Amino acid sequence: SQFTPRMASRLGLRPSPHRAIFARAPPSALRPATLAAGRLACASRRLVSTAAAAPAAAAPDDGWRTRQGLSRYADRRDIEFVLHEVERVEAEAEEVRGVLDSVEDFVEEWGPVDPALDQSPPKLITAEDGSTAVEVHPETKRLLADYHARGFAEMEELGLPFSVQCAAQFLFGGAFPSNPLGFTVLTRCAADLLEAHGSESLKGEYLSDMRAGKVVGTMALSEPHAGSSLGNIRTTAVRAGDGPLGQEYRLKGDKMWTSAAFHDVTPNTAHMLLARIAGPDTPPGARGISLFLVPHLLPDGSPNDVEVVGLNKKMGHRALPNCAWSLGGGAGGATGYLVGEPHQGLSAMFQMMNAMRIEVGLWAAALGKRGLNESLLYAEGREQGGKRIIEHDDVKRMLLQQKAYAEGAFALTIHAATLHDRNAAGDAEAGAMLDSIIEVVKSWPSEWCLEANKWAMQVLGGYGYTQDFPLEQLYRDARPNMIYEGTSGVQALDLLGRKASMGGGAALKLLGAAVAEDVAAARAAGGAPLAE
């Protein structure tokens, strides 16, 4: 829907000074006539623009993004403040601005597509040969192609700190709540896992294509009967000898809740999959789990013995398909390649799980911030009781509550990303502190940014839960974050049941000392008194 100025006036709505706050993309905008071509390039560790000529007809400035003003997607000043003045990341300010400018250009052009992706989720189709596959929205494929064409998937290869990559992801998250970029996040995390634990032959076959977006990566852990209790998985792997890519196995079983699988975005998909090696030497429970790479297409181009069984109809994140599927429905079983050592799969998979926990927390923070901005822009234009509703104390309270949750969540996730950067540079204490808070980084933003989205909807009143405004979609897209990568209760069990006691609580002591140091510095700086 789209409100005309006349209708907005009748409803008591006033145009925002920042943008046309009620603009929703008409069908003609779902595929921009001209997308600015561009790529990120690095010269002397500084990003420079290589964009082609501007489109023939520049879109009018409807306020989708104002570099010095308020964006509906995020707050550049806050992002740069956290990066440079709080975390003091090891990156030049000009370099960071170049990255964020490029991301903002992308989301400005593609942001209007997201509602269509939410309203037309992937669907299961049957081919002439009787096989089934998942068909995504055509704009998802075009969006992902442009994402790769501009070089956003190469930020890690350009040497950008993970904290800066997360800042860019924060902007993407606010613009695309239906999560079409989940394909790229899962693939990057899967590629990192393969690079850390895979054999040279296996990396030679798949890694470069995964980095280039030619092969999508997934994580396949859960099964219909086993979600967080991975020690109960039943998918089995039988040794089939050594092949050109290392140890080959034939796998049989069922997997559930696998995102970015069986789609038509790329011809091939590589599942990072947990299974149990058949045999008396396999320990029971979680200690007997191994990690495998299971592709849809084998190296010779022939199809693997994998099949999609169903497409889960989700409440949110509808641009990203989520599948139930089976392995080994044929006589021989699906071909899989061992990654790492036998029976060490779960410990290896924790690398990908922890990376995804940061991503989930970051995504939740982005949705919390988007909700804040949407409700703030609405409150600036809506009049009730003879004044703009932003001037009412209760509305101010709801806006400030959102601000505290969303900006606190963003600061927390960037702090985690900075600890990741320090750990990668050899700071073992930073790695220990990150390990001690990773569950909080996932759970706290997921829970409290959903609360922020609740208050955003409340600011809009009756309009908040209609599809004429993005708040109802944001709420739906924020809700699954509390479940992804383990529910809040499971995260608490992991934190208190395992992490808190490791090394005699050494990591928590390091964290406590760091907090005490910050508190002491804040007190020394003066200002408002701190609560004990």
Image: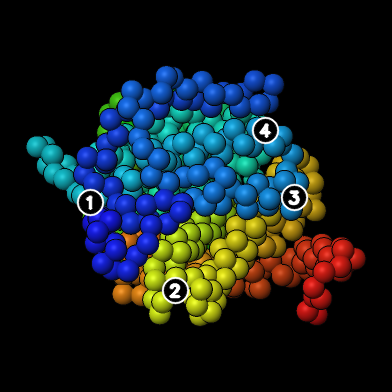
Where is residue 196? Give x, y as percent. 60, 38
Where is residue 52? Give x, y as percent. 44, 19
Q: What colouring does the structure picture have? A: rainbow
Circle 2 crowding by C-alpha within 10 Å: few under 14, some 14–19, many from 20: few
Q: Which residue is mark 3?
A: 85
Decide: is 459 above or below 264: below
Q: Which residue is mark 2?
A: 387
Tell me the mark number nearer the camera, choosing from 2 and 1: 2
Q: Amino acid at mark 2?
A: Lys
Tell me the mark number nearer the camera, choosing from 4 and 2: 2
Decide: is 306 above or below 285: above
Picture quadrant where residue 126 is located: top left
Where is residue 526? Give x, y as percent. 86, 68
Gap between marks 1 and 4 measured at Cα: 39 Å
Circle 4 crowding by C-alpha within 10 Å: few under 14, some 14–19, many from 20: few
Residue occupying the far right of the picture: 524
Q: Which residue is mark 1?
A: 120
Image-based side of 92 in relation to 372, left or right: right
Quarter containing the C terminus: bottom right
Where is residue 20? Give x, y as percent. 37, 52
SS class, disc 4: helix
Q: Amino acid at mark 3?
A: Glu
Asked whether the residues under the numbered discs 1 and 3 touch, taking CB atoms below 8 Å apart as contact, a structural biologist would say: no
SS class, disc 1: loop
Residue occupying the far front of the picture: 386
Gap between marks 2 and 3 measured at Cα: 37 Å
Gap between marks 1 and 3 measured at Cα: 41 Å
Asked whether the residues under the numbered discs 3 and 4 touch, taking CB atoms below 8 Å apart as contact, a structural biologist would say: no
Picture quadrant where residue 30 is located: top left
Q: Amino acid at mark 4?
A: Glu
Q: Which is nearer the N-term, disc 1 or disc 4? A: 4
